[in-house]
Structure formats: C-alpha cells, structure tokens
Amino acid sequence: MIRRSLLLIILALGSTFPVIAGNTGKPSLTQTEITLKPTALETEACKYISQYLLQNHYRKVAVNDSLSLQIFNRYLDNLDGSKSYFVASDIGRLRQIYGNKIDDEFLAGKATAGFDIYNLFLKRAKEKMRYMKAAADTVHLDFSTPETLDLDRKADPWPVDKEQLVGLWRKELKYQWLNLKYSEKSNKVIRRELAKSFTSRLNLLNRQKPDDAFQVYTYALTTSFDPHTSYFSLDEYKNFQIDMSRSLEGIGAKLQTEGEYTVINELIPGGPAFKSNLLKKGDKIIGVGQGKKVEIVDVFGWRINDVVKLIRGKKGTLVRLKIIPASQGGRGAAKIVALLRDKVNLQEQAAKKSIILQNGHKTGVITIPSFYLDFEGERQNIGNYNSTSRDVSRILEELNAEHVDGIIIDLRDNGGGSLDESVKVTGLFIPGGPVVQISNSTGERTVLKDEDSREQYEGPLAVLVNRYSASASEIFAAAIQDYGRGVIIGERTFGKGTVQSLIPLSRQASVQGGQPELGEIKLTIAKFYRISGGSTQHKGVEPDISMPSMIDNARIGEDTYTSSLPWSTIPPSFYKPTAEVTPEKVELLRKKFQEQSSRNSLYQSYLDDLKTLDQIRQKKAVSLQDSSVKSETETIKQIEKRWVLEQDATKDLKKDVLLNQSASVVADLAEIMTVPLEPDSGKQPLSR
C-alpha cells in the first residue's frame, strides 16, 4: 500500500551532552573530502530516472530553479531533519553552490550535487558521532535543571555555530539517557549501551558506499514529484518483489525508512506480527535480537535492506524487536517484542465473521484486513482460490441465515490491495453500477463497474474506518457513501488516491549486452475518483459519524506529505443512489450517537485518555527533568495498557470500544430505516 521510498538517512539518536574541549569554530566547506562518487551504473540509471519522471509521471513539473530548490530543501531535510549536523554557514554555502544547479543536473541525468552534499553530511555526521561517543563514556548529567528539547525542529533555524550545535547534542543525549532510564536500565548499563550505539553508528558511517548516497539523493528527486514515486536499486527491487509475493519466512511486515528509523509500514494479515497484536503500523524498530538470549543489535540508522536481513529467518525461530510504539508519539521508553518467524498464512488473512449482541440487537461484523486475491489461482481457475469477494459473499450468506439486525464492515488498518476485489465487494451491497473512476494525466477516464444487478445484502450497513484505511478501502467506503447505501463511521481515511506502475529501467538495445540491469522506478500515473466526481486523493473519505482512534493523525496521512498530489474533481459518473442512508438520517444518527455516547462511561473514559495522549503528542518540546519525563512515561504506559487491544476485534469484542459504539449506531440505523420520514421531507419510507 502506502510506501515511502527506501533510503538510508543516518541521523543521530536524540541525544545531548555538555561541551567537551574541541573545535567550536564554524565548519568549513573546504574541509570536505569527497570520498563517494556515483558509479558508472548509477550515472546511467540517473539519466533514465530523469527521463521517466519527465515523460511518464502524472504530475507535469516545470524543470527550473524552483524545482531545484524543492529538491535541495527536501534532500537536506531527509539528511538532517533534526538540524543537528549542519550549521547555518554550511547551509548557506550549499544553497549558494547547488540551490539553483540541481535542475540543470536533473535534465542532464547527473547526481554530482547529491554526492557532494552527501560527502559533507558524512563528515559532519562522523564529527557528531565521535563527540557523542566521548560524552557517553565520561559525562555526568544533571536532570534537576529545568531544560527542554524540541523534538520537531523542522521549523527551527539551523544552529548558528558549532557551540550552539554542541548545546543541542547535550540535550539530545540527556533525553536519550532518560528514555533508557525508564526502560529500567541502571546508569552503568545506560552508559555502556549509549557508547556502544554511537560506536556502531560511527562504524556504519565509515562503511558508506556510493549506493547509499545515490539512494538518498534519488529519493529526494522522485518524492519531489509525489511521495509514492520511488526508485528501486536491484537489491531493493528484490526485497520489494518478496514483499509483494509474501513468500519469505519472517514476521509478516513491510518496512520503510523514515528519517533515521526503520518503521513498520504494513502488517501483512496472516503473518506473525499481525496475529500477535504486539506491533502496529508506525512502530519504530531500533533494535533486533536473535533468539531469547542473543544481545539485541542497535539498528538505528541502518540500511533498510540490512535490517530486513536481520529480521528474516527460518520458520519457528525467535526474533526480538526493540521498538518505540507509534502510540507514544515518538517519545517514551522502548519495549521488546518477541515473535516466532513463520510464513504468511493466506487463510488467516481472510475476511472473518463475528457477532455482537447488544441491548437485544444482533449485529454482524465482517473484518477485512486487506482486499486480497490469489491472482495465480484465479488465472488457473482453481475452484477454491482465495478471494475477498468470495469470502465476504459466503459470510453474508451465514449472517443472513442468522437474521442479524445489521452489518458492520470493519476496514480499520486495511491499507488496500486488489482494486478488482474492492469493486466486487462493493457489488455485494449495491444493485449494480459504477464504483470508481480512474483518470490519467491526459484526462482519459476509465470507469470500473459492478456488472451484477444482484444485491446480496440489503439491510442496515455501516463501514468502520480509521486513518490507516487506504486506497482500495477508501474506494469501497466512498462508493457506499455516494450510493447512500450505508453509514461511514470512524475518522478520516488516509487519502491515498493515486495509481502507481512499476517500470523497469531498460537500456537501449545497442548497449544491453551482458550488462547488469538498472533497477526499477515506481511511477504515479493516474488518480482515483469517486463516482460523485471528487478524488479520494489527499482528503480521503470523511466519516458520517466521527469516532477517533488512538492513531496520531497529525503524523499519518497523505496530507502529511509535502509533495502529495492535490484533491481535485472530474465530472461524476451516471449512477442511481440507493438512498438507504440520506443526509436526514445521518443527522438523526449523529444526534442519537451523541446522546447515547455521552452516557457511556467507558467511551467517555476512552475519549479522556485520548485527549491526554494527544496533549502529550502535540508538545513540540519535551522536558529534560527527571520527574516530568517519569510522569509522562507512566501516563503513556497506563493509556496503552487500557486501550492497546482496542483495535483487536478478533480476540475480545468487549474490549473494542469503537466497534461496540459502531454496533449501537447500526442498531439505531435499523430502527430509523423502519420508520417513515416526516411528510415535508419529500422522501418515501423504505420498505424491507
């Protein structure tokens, strides 16, 4: 689904320490020793990357000084988003030399500027790691001093000089020390772990190769067009293919790099991570250990391919991951998660049925983790191949036989999947018609339709979504909403409404011979549009009834990417709404929900905890005083303990507060659909 390009960005651990004797003058650009240069293969690939971006990408971008500065700024942000390596004089000189030059190199298919900047970055990063290592070995920190550290420094100015930079490092070390302390580590262990971590990172910096610089620079190039366009080297493409086939044994998770962290991008339904409920999308992996006793290896700043190799292994073997949970908003103590490696079980990624009995109402729940399809089985026409639409159809028959009062389609955390399956599942709930429109850069439109006029389920329907519901999930939810077929519950969806195509970078026939391939480029080539005409891109699908999740919405979603394609409209398709859910009924449902939820102590407690968590997340700065950090850490732990199972609808439905609230809404909808509207509304009562 949603995938940021793979890259290596080595940033220092949020760390800080007192000034130690050393050069505090302004770093000079002339001190840089250029050690990395693009290989002949990378130089050739760069030409093809530029060509494909300009000729085939959905967004037609003018190649000028404005684009040059966009790429330049994005590249620096990727390298030093915490503004803890470069000082203002570095940035001024780099901008003067390269700020208006990158567009010319882009047209020529060169990466000289990218490598020059990366070499200076390596020099500055090594300086910091040496300094951090020395401080971790000897420093004595005072945690009673009222100090704060800005965790989000993107809007902050660059440090004026080395002295100011070192002051920032001191605060970072202090913060990291406190986090380890509240992971129940002794001072001796903390000092040893930090020193070892900084040594590991310095060794990693010393092992940098041209491919590392090329990946980071091409990421800045491609994501200046849109966040889902990316270049894959040969190694990365192999990993991408393994992810898509889901054939290798491991934990069943797709990873991506964000800044200095390796982050869980998707949990594959049926995999060990998904089944354990111990990992969530957005969790940051900072360490990997083999078995029960082998020491955990710090992977902060590692190449993603190397992290993946550590996590993969034989079926039945144990791997331990040290993570910073996404629910903590990037702060607080890390925790250890142990998983048994296994292959993804396709049966366990299938749609599942459950039933909620509540106040005399019986509500059926169909949880769809992804829109899956066994493409090979379908091609060979194997009778029992895996298909979302086939499984949901079977479950609908069972729920109809059990005479449920209504049905909830649970699409929380469903990042998408097969577009055709999304259309087919939609067709189970409507009497036929268009489901989604696709428009390319030339304005050419394709409309995907449900050709079957049969409607397998005609009763009260709700679709439960959250911020991680994306792509094919948004297409389903948008169609149900546009037809007025059901009520959408939850929070605004991700907003990923673009179409990508994977294109091999092939040489001209005259230079092919036995030379290695040049990799692949994943290009955005089209956008999805609702049948009502608006795109799902950027805005996502707005719920009819809002129920916030524990997801940090300020950090997740298409609108958090600076280069995401904008929301837009095209002419609507011709379709006839079924109108089981009208604006009048939605308004009545909202009033009923507000009344009943205000009296529900469990839901109100959930909202109070969420408000507290959001207040912690929204703090730009964190306290570096012992007592404040301890209090915040304990608060986060307690909130997680109360609601960590909130999204796990397959294990204990009673603990899923949002699913139970949604069942109440469906019960209200069932009652409303049997009552005629007021005569002046101009609507006719629905018959069932």
Image (cartoon, grey):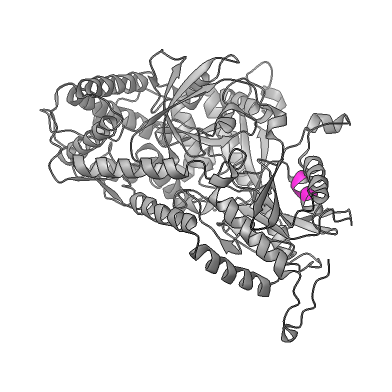
Name the quadrant containing residue 447: bottom right
Q: Which residues are magenta?
A: 421-425
- Residue drawn 58% across the image and 15% down it: 316
Residue 150: x %, y % from top left: 27, 46
Give above or below for 568 relative to 308: below
Residue 281: x %, y % from top left: 52, 39
Give above or below for 667 relative to 275: below
Depth check, front residue: 51 or 126? 126
**Residue most extreme to the front:** 360
Q: Is residue 98 visible?
A: no
Q: Is residue 266 left or right of residue 88?
A: right
Q: Is residue 228 visible?
A: yes
Q: Is residue 411 left or right of residue 4?
A: right
- Residue drawn 49% across the image and 65% down it: 598
Q: Is residue 51 left or right of residue 429?
A: left
Give above or below for 252 relative to 78: above
Residue 227: x %, y % from top left: 54, 45
- Residue drawn 12% across the image and 33% down it: 19
Give above or below for 683 relative to 651: below
Name the quadrant containing residue 95: top left
Name the quadrant containing residue 34: top left
Depth check, front residue: 245 or 162? 245
